[in-house]
Image (cartoon, rainbow, N blue to C red):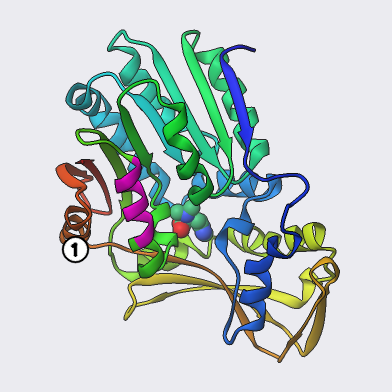
Amino acid sequence: EERLQIQSLQAPTPIVASKVGGDVVKGLTQTPKALPPCYFYDDRGSELFERICELPEYYLTRTETAILQKYAAEIAQITGACELVELGSGNSAKTRILLDAYQQLDSPLHYLPIDVCAGILESSAKQLLQEYPSLEVYALAGTYESALAQLTAKKLASRMMCFIGSTLGNLNLQECDVFLSQISTSLEVGEYFLLGIDLQKPKEILEPAYNDSQGVTAAFNLNMLEHLNRRFEGNFDLTQFAHRAFYNETEQQIEMHLKSERSQTVQLKSLNLTINFAPGETILTEISRKFNLETIQKQLTAKGLVPIQTWTDTNQWFGLLLCQL
Ligand code: AVI
């Protein structure tokens, strides 16, 4: 298929073997223990996340989708024809709303999805090509840093970088700062950045969204251990860890942990790693920060990403910001 190119930035044979999984070693040997959230997204994890997006308690996707549906045409009007670059594209469900709006502009449709999960990237790109006969897709499988570094070479037209779904919330303050700088340097003056963020709200609404009654979020969290077992020859026993998620009001973030149910030792053979867990000890697998619109607007402006339009829903639960460099 000429309209589809997929580039994998994860070399099958790592050049520096010791670097692969270095983030896992670092996270599991520090106190308190932590793991990078990108390890959620193997094929099964991406599938579980799709199910999370449809849960009654998980208001984020539904709310953002409604905002996009309402304002996509306006966004396309403001930016004019452009290439859509999407970080953390997943199944590209919400992207279709933007693609529909840009299709109305009657110019070539270019889409550059970026995701750590090569499986979902490929299946959703193929699906999109069937739905949009004039679409061209250039997909990048890799981390945001590796992908952003590759982007300049592939440029065909003026761009809008999309980072929706509040994935920005999964970066801590320092990572967020570095990330926004990278976005800013990878854009040219006049280009756009579309950002979707989950806003601060009472914990009575937040906590159920990360503790759903069907246990999908728990399965999503535990699946990270399964992923590590497969990837690094590990022996995590999934029955001996439990999902925990709560809102940290001081930090204004959901924190997701895996709690060791007893004293246990786990090995990750290919990383040459043995880890001891005390009973009740936790691994922080994710933070999900909840934003204040004015604060993020200032942060973006400081990076040269000037918010030119901000949309939200009637409850002010979710924000969509269109910024221009
Ligand atoms: C991808 N990210 C924005 C989700 C979130 O809400 O922080 C990941 C997630 N974790 C648990 N549920 C969903």
Q: From this viewpoint, is residue 215 visible?
A: no
Say what amino acid the circle numbered 1 marks.
Thr
Horizontally, residue 236 falls left or right of residue 152, namely right
Q: Quadrant of the N terminus?
A: top right
Residue 291 place in picture, x, y as percent: 28, 62
The residue pinned by badge 1 equals 295
Q: Residue 302 in magenta?
A: no
> What number of labels is visible?
1
Does any atom of ligand 1 lie closer than 8 Å to the CB of label 1? no
Disc 1 element: helix
The majority secondary structure of the magenta stretch comes to helix
Residue 169 place in picture, x, y as percent: 39, 60
The image quarter containing residue 203 is bottom left
Residue at 57% across / 25% down in the picture?
Answer: 125
Q: Determine crowd level at label 1: few under 14, some 14-19, many 20+ residues with C-alpha closer than 10 A.
A: few
Q: Residue 179 in magenta?
A: yes
Horizontally, residue 137 falls left or right of residue 66, namely right
Q: Camera-side residue: 173 or 20?
A: 20
Residue 49 place in picture, x, y as percent: 57, 49
The image quarter containing residue 263 is bottom right
**Relative height, residue 130 to residue 91 (above, below):** above
Residue at 39% across / 42% down in the picture?
Answer: 62
Horizontally, residue 304 falls left or right of residue 166, namely left
**Relative height, residue 184 to residue 130 (above, below):** below
Residue at 34% across / 21% down in the picture?
Answer: 157
Residue 302 place in picture, x, y as percent: 18, 58
Q: Which residues are magenta?
A: 178-186
